[in-house]
């Protein structure tokens, strides 16, 4: 099942995102691993969350990242740091970002090892994030899984390297569908749902295209609980 939280339907998508994240963090025990995403939509939701404060139990990871220095404006880490982590005083020890100084394959393997070490279930099976946050591109991509390529390539690696494209020039690392679909929850955070992102959002609703055409459809509601926040 897919749950839709849409501003167009009179719901406050960013407010509900914040409320639910605080609710989840208050219910579960121990550390709460959250994989963040990047992009303009994520910025809107992170700004909203920063205004409410960040529960101390949260531990932050990234579902994909560009292989650029952490201070680079194209870095997903930098976006989260500027709009969420720094202003709310998140401790450095609660932040687990990919080592983007490494070559792509090494970065992916190193980050997979970090996740296996710190996220529940990792040492003996597929790690299970309580929550993975994803964006949605106008072309239907999510994470760094891009149209026209097999999104299930190297699925067992959990994190894999991604070669740059014309539209996405930086080499990257990304969670694979196997890791994403093993999460307890996957939340898409989207803005411009009735304008720039309208086509991609429609593909999520219809679920008729192939995952190669629309990689966001690799997220399987039969395997994980999917909520789509659409502002």
Image (cartoon, rainbow, N blue to C red):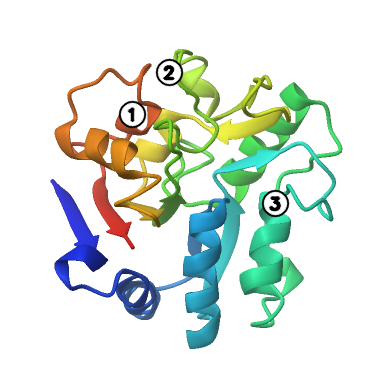
Does label 3 or label 2 sit earlier along the sequence?
3
Task: Answer whether residue 53 is visible to the viewer in this image.
Answer: no
Q: In terms of secondary structure, where does tag 3 sit?
A: loop
Give neighbour class at mark 1: few <14, some 14-19, many 20+ (Cα, 10 Å).
Answer: many
Residue name at image x 68 percent, y 22 percent: 164
Q: Label for residue 62?
A: none
> In the visual, does 112 lie left or right of 73?
left
Q: Which mark is residue 218?
A: 1
Please tell me which residue is depicted at 72% across the width and 44% down the height of the picture.
98
Earlier in the chain: of badge 3 and badge 1, it is 3
Q: Position of residue 71 (x, y in %)?
A: 84, 55
Residue that numbered label 3 is attached to: 97
Choose between 209 and 90: the one closer to the eye.
209
User: Residue 178: x and y, percent?
Assistant: 40, 30
- Quadrant, the C terminus: bottom left
Toward which corner of the image does residue 211 lie, by quadrant? top left
- For image coordinates 23% across by 38% down, the residue present is 202
Q: CA distance from mark 3 to mark 1?
A: 23 Å
Res. 110 image quadrant: top right
Near mark 2 (Cα within 10 A), the count class, few <14, some 14-19 or many ≥20, is: some
Secondary structure beneath disc 1? helix
- Say if 73 sits above or below 220 in the image: below
Near-viewer residue (225 or 157)? 225
Give the left or right position of residue 25, taking residue 97 as reference. left
Q: CA distance from mark 3 to mark 2?
A: 23 Å
Can residue 102 be seen here? The reply is yes
- How far apart, in angstroms, are the residues tagged by discs 1 and 2? 8 Å
The numbered mark, 1 or 2, whose residue comes first in the sequence reads: 2
CB-based contact (under 8 Å), mark 1 and mark 2: yes
Q: Which residue in the protein does label 2 denote?
A: 152
């Amino acid at each position: 099942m897919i749950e839709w939280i849409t501003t167009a339907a009179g719901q406050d998508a960013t407010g509900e995102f914040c409320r639910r994240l605080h609710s989840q963090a208050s219910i579960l025990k121990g550390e709460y691993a959250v994989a963040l995403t990047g992009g303009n939509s994520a910025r809107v939701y992170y700004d909203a969350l920063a205004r409410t404060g960040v529960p101390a139990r949260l531990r932050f990871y990234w579902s994909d990242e560009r292989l650029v220095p952490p201070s680079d404006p194209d870095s997903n880490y930098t976006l989260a740091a500027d709009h969420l982590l720094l202003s709310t005083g998140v401790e450095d020890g609660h932040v687990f970002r990919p080592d983007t100084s490494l070559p792509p394959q090494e970065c992916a393997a190193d980050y997979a090892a970090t996740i296996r070490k710190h996220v529940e279930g990792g040492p003996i099976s597929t790690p299970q994030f309580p929550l993975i946050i994803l964006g949605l591109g106008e072309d239907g991509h999510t994470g760094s899984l891009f149209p026209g390529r097999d999104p299930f390539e190297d699925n067992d690696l959990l994190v894999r390297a991604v070669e740059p494209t014309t539209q996405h020039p930086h080499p990257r690392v990304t969670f694979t569908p196997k890791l994403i679909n093993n999460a307890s929850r996957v939340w898409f955070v989207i803005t411009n749902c009735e304008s720039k992102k309208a086509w991609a959002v429609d593909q999520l609703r219809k679920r008729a295209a192939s995952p190669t055409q629309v990689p966001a459809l690799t997220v399987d509601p039969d395997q994980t609980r999917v909520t789509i926040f659409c502002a």
